[in-house]
Amino acid sequence: MELFDHLALGFATALSLQNLWFCLLGCLMGTLIGVLPGLGPVATIAMLLPATYSLPPVSALIMLAGIYYGAQYGGSTTAILLKLPGESASVVTTLDGYQMARRGRAGVALATSAIGSFIAGCVSTLILAAFAIPLTEAAFRFGPAEYFSLMLLGLIGAVVLSSGSLIKALAMILLGVLLGLVGVDTNSGVARYAFDVPELTDGLGFVALAMGMFGFAEIAGNLGPHATQESFVRQVNRLWPAREDFRRMFPAILRGTALGSALGILPGGGATLASFAAYSLEKKVSRHPGEFGQGAIEGVAGPESANNAAAQTSFIPLLTLGVPANAVMALMVGAMMIHNIQPGPQVMVSNPALFWGLIASMWIGNVLLVVLNLPLLGIWTRLLTVPYRYLYPAILAFCCVGIFSVQNTPFDIYQAVFFGFLGYLLVKLECEPAPLLLGFVLGPLMEEHFRRAMMIAEGDWTTFVSRPLSLGLLTCAALLVAAVSLPKIRKGREEAFQES
């Protein structure tokens, strides 16, 4: 009964005209950046962080959340019609979605994507609402030692579940932690790694780092020539799948929803890993594995359901424990801190309208996305005819204005340019920058909780293993490290990302 009271408060908040408008705006922008190749939710949210300063906290978070899960919808449109994944989670959709379009079944593929995304979004939001109260109550039992162990588990999970080399992912985490240590030490008051630069005594700017690593670096990476590809918009005639299509796609939707919901909660999981894992699962359980890559409807239904489910359940550790599960959630932490909101279990108690309003807005957003996506199909595909050389100057100017508006100092722009070059270099070296952002956010928090725990225990480090909850979290972290060291598991991890 308590849950229904909370949801009633959430819908009352989310259905206000102002919040409904920002939910619609976020869904539209998310679909747009999902459609346009080269732009992704991480880069877009990083660019828009300064624009949320003047907004009420609830409206700002509703809009940013809409951008995130809206991008999962939009990315499938060009993946199916043009074999151009709008964002990384839609890479797998190109394998069978594009082949369905070539066979004149583009409408069925798009409808399958929309239906799977809608079901997955609604179910995963229900899971988020159901788990919110018990997880928040459990989080109040956490002390400094437990929070340190939880964040350590989160960073190890980000390394294990990130794509690419484990060594490179670990290096990115450590680099992010080191960057987070720049500034004045809160205990001693001594500047660390500031190199006598006054602007660095307050630490590196989160907005400058996020925009540089994901905004400027994305622009630099997309300035190369793009091949034009044939569009199948004219063949989008029959949208509603046939009875046989429904028979084959519904089990895949349910499997993708379950798998994506679980992987979204895990640190470092996220929509991309969920979509690849769902595709691998569908190939293994299918009675017709030879059809995959040739237009199998399960190859669209499973991954699209998984990436949308993961996008929404990734809010669970953020809202209940204050720990971001992926790079987008790290940006959401930054957005909350901009509005002087400390992420964690106290949000539900101190600001229930924000907590439940955000959850309720996800149901509303899923309905809006289904209503908007298919009718706007022609508009989204026409945007692909705009040359990127006309788009990137406006994006770059918008980034610079946003960065400057944070503290009205050009030094922040210099920081963003530096991190843009660094981000571009890391991409060229095949180092995923997302773990760096997680390390940058969690590193200072880990240090703070570690020092608090040691002060409370009077320097006795055994406090981390003498407390049952902390010991359990550290044990999980050790098991993750041990598991990924096994050859069979390491090989399976590598195969999960090979389909692209």
Image: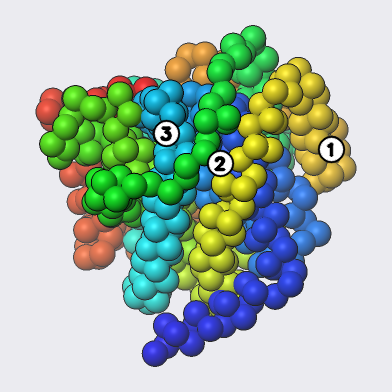
Q: CA distance from mark 3 to mark 1?
A: 44 Å
Residue on which the image places disc 3: 105
Q: Position of residue 236 (x, y in %)?
A: 52, 36
Q: Nearer the viewer, mark 1 or mark 2?
A: 2
Marks 3 and 1, the one that precedes in the sequence:
3
Labels 3 & 1 near each other (Cβ < 8 A): no
Q: Nearer the viewer, mark 3 or mark 2?
A: 3
Q: Position of residue 143 (x, y in %)?
A: 38, 67
Residue on which the image places disc 1: 401
Residue on which the image places disc 2: 74
Q: Is residue 223 left or right of residue 397?
A: left
**Image quarter of the C terminus:** top left
Q: Residues within 10 Å of mark 1 (few under 14, many from 20)?
A: some
Instruction: Confirm whether residue 53 shows in the render.
Output: yes
Query: Which of 277/384 is in front?
Result: 384
Marks 1 and 2, the one that precedes in the sequence:
2
Query: Which of 341/149 is in front?
Result: 341
Q: Nearer the viewer, mark 3 or mark 1?
A: 3
Labels 1 & 2 near each other (Cβ < 8 A): no
Q: Residues within 10 Å of mark 2 (few under 14, many from 20)?
A: many
Secondary structure category for the residue under label 1: helix
Q: Residues within 10 Å of mark 3 (few under 14, many from 20)?
A: many
The amino acid pointed to by label 2 is Gly
Mark on residue 392? none
Q: Is residue 114 left or right of residue 67?
A: left
Q: CA distance from mark 1 to mark 2?
A: 27 Å
- Residue ID at (28%, 60%): 470
